[in-house]
Image (cartoon, rainbow, N blue to C red):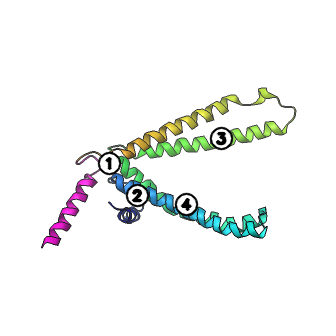
Amino acid sequence: MTFGQSIKTCFRKYAVFKGRACRSEFWWFTLFTFLVSIALDFLLGLFMIPLIFKGQFNAESINSVSTPFYIVSLVVGLALLLPTLGVLVRRLHDRDKSGWWVGILYIVEAIFVALSLVAGLTLFAIGENPANTADDIPFGMLFLVALLAILLFAYAILLLVWCCQRGTIGYNKYGPDPLAAEEENVVDVELKNLN
């Protein structure tokens, strides 16, 4: 599958979480989302450069330029969320793994973010009160946040390894082998060209 075919397939299967996706479909679409992110950051940088040269690089001018870009980035990110999740789930299906592995990642990530916010706010509150001592720091909560960060990292590595491996050869419980279907399409096109 080529870069363009991957993008077309992922947008055609916008919120499809059934079936399978080969490595090339997943990795080309991952590259596409990365390039879109880089392009948005590059455009933001281009609009910031005149502020620097005009000497207007202050909080008000930065916010006036960056706020529309953050809104556009949010809209683009939300637009790419479902096809990205869909192709990741289909990629796991190709490895004969449940798509719930992705769900577990996001659940643990949400818990990590929530605990991090609570820990940060707690530390801020402790720091604001001069009567507090080091004994007031919630080390148990900080340990839990650090442990969740390590677990998230290990989990992400596991998903990365699975996404890099070849899918199950032949039919599995999630459908036919996408590589076999691609090879059949190539043969069909070559046969049509011969006729």
Label at residue 94? 1
Which residue position holds label 4? 38
Determine crowd level at label 3: few under 14, some 14-19, many 20+ residues with C-alpha closer than 10 A: some
Mark 1 or mark 4, earlier in chain: 4
Above or below for 87 versus 126: below
Asked if marks 3 and 1 touch (Cβ < 8 Å), the reply is no
Mark 2 or mark 4, earlier in chain: 2
Residue at position x 78%, y 65% from top?
Answer: 60
Residue 15: give x, y in percent of width and height. Answer: 42, 60
Which residue position holds label 2? 28
Residue at the extreme right of the image, as rendered: 130
Q: Which residues are magenta?
A: 170-195
Q: Secondary structure at mark 4?
A: helix
Q: Residue 21, located in which quarter of the rendered image?
A: bottom left
Residue 87: give x, y in percent of width and height. Answer: 40, 55
Mark 3 or mark 1, earlier in chain: 1
Mark 3 or mark 2, earlier in chain: 2
Residue 82: give x, y in percent of width and height. Answer: 46, 58
Determine crowd level at label 1: few under 14, some 14-19, many 20+ residues with C-alpha closer than 10 A: many
Residue 193 falls within the magenta-colored stretch: yes
Which residue position holds label 3? 116
Q: Is residue 57 left or right of residue 160?
A: right
Amino acid at dot 3: Ser
Amino acid at dot 4: Ile
Determine crowd level at label 2: few under 14, some 14-19, many 20+ residues with C-alpha closer than 10 A: some
Asked if marks 3 and 2 touch (Cβ < 8 Å), the reply is no
Amino acid at dot 1: Asp
Determine the CA span between mark 3 and mark 1.
34 Å
